[in-house]
Amino acid sequence: MILDAHTHIAPPELRQDRRSFFAGEPDFEVLYRDPKARLIGATDLVEYLDANRIQAACSFGFPWNDDGKTRLCDDYVLDAASRYPGRIVPFACVNPLRGRQAVREAERCLSAGARGLGEIATYGAGLGPEVRSGLAPLAELAAEAGVPVLLHTNEAVGHSYPGKAPMSLEEIYRLVRRHPRTRWILAHWGGGLFVYHLLRREADDVLANVWYDTAAGPFLYKPDVFRRFLNIAGADRLVFGSDYPLLGLPRYLREMDAAGVRGPEREAVLGGNLARLLGLGEGA
Ligand SMILES: [Zn+2]
């Protein structure tokens, strides 16, 4: 069973006129100013799933500054999940800098059937103290509800690209240490945090509830990252996420081929780990 942990969908209003959503939303504008940055709807997503024999995908909107836009996108995702049951796993996407509004929106979505929070991202603001304190009640809410938080993380060094947030490994580590009951999926290989599963002390405990997704990995890392990750952090901590429509499954399969990821390890990464994390059975 193949599951995709990381896909983005957008309501028709947004797909038809993205420019009208730029005002007051610098993060969105940075990511989607280029018309080549695709915005797709639920039907397009399900076509991708069908074409690649992917059973289901976690999907989400955008962490807007404007609460009305956030609700519009969350409602679209929830509605998509009910139109395509078992294919689209809805996550609630909120902006942690919106404080109580974000918590209220997350609660609303969870009671309407959201299976996780994500992709929580503060692209421009990074993961400093203000963002971490906005994330705190969301992390606790997710722990209470028994759902994971898919958090945008990225590497602190290397080439720059739209959406690369200023954040340090220490900030990511502090955040997860503060919320030990929360199950985290750190997007984009956790910005490299997985290396620290090698530490002799503390990190194994702090990172016990942390998983990592592969989203956008082919743009960021050499294929060897798969082998290195599996050797360091183990095959049960990595979940396939494509960042579709940015990239699709075939590109990841080629990278896994190049890295020699086969058999049970490959099955775990492509779906087994996420199925356990979300409590999805076979055929769910
Ligand atoms: Zn991301």
Image: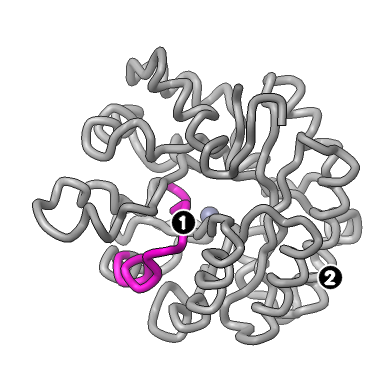
**Label 1 to label 2: alpha-carbon separation:** 35 Å
Q: Is residue 206 above or below residue 246?
A: below
Which amino acid type is shown beneath numbered disc 1?
Arg
In this picture, residue 246 sits left or right of residue 265: right
Single out the residue that lies furthest toward the left.
200
Q: Which residue is mark 2?
A: 20
Q: Which mark is residue 215?
A: none
1 and 2 marks in contact (CB < 8 Å)? no
Secondary structure found at label 2? helix
List x then y, in percent, for residue 98. 63, 83
Precedes in sequence: disc 1 or disc 2: 2
Q: Is residue 65 above or below residue 152?
A: below
In the rendered picture of this protein, how many numbered marks are placed on residues?
2
In this picture, residue 132 sits left or right of residue 26: left
Q: Nearer the viewer, residue 144 or 220?
A: 144
Magenta residues? 173-188
Seen at 71% across and 72% down, the residue is 107
Q: Nearer the viewer, residue 96 or 203?
A: 203
Quarter in which the N terminus is drawn: top right
> Is the residue at mark 2 in contact range of ligand 1, meaning its CB lies under 8 Å from it?
no
List x then y, in percent, for residue 170. 26, 68
Seen at 27% across and 60% down, the residue is 206
Q: Is residue 9 above or below residue 85?
A: below
175 is within the stretch colored magenta: yes
Could you classify mark 1 by the number of other residues whose Cα lies within 10 Å: few (under 14), some (14-19), or many (20 or more)?
Answer: many
List x then y, in percent, for residue 183. 46, 56
Which amino acid type is shown beneath numbered disc 2?
Ser
Seen at 34% across and 56% down, the residue is 155
Seen at 84% across and 61% down, the residue is 75
Could you classify mark 2 by the number of other residues whose Cα lies within 10 Å: few (under 14), some (14-19), or many (20 or more)?
Answer: few
Q: Which mark is residue 183?
A: 1
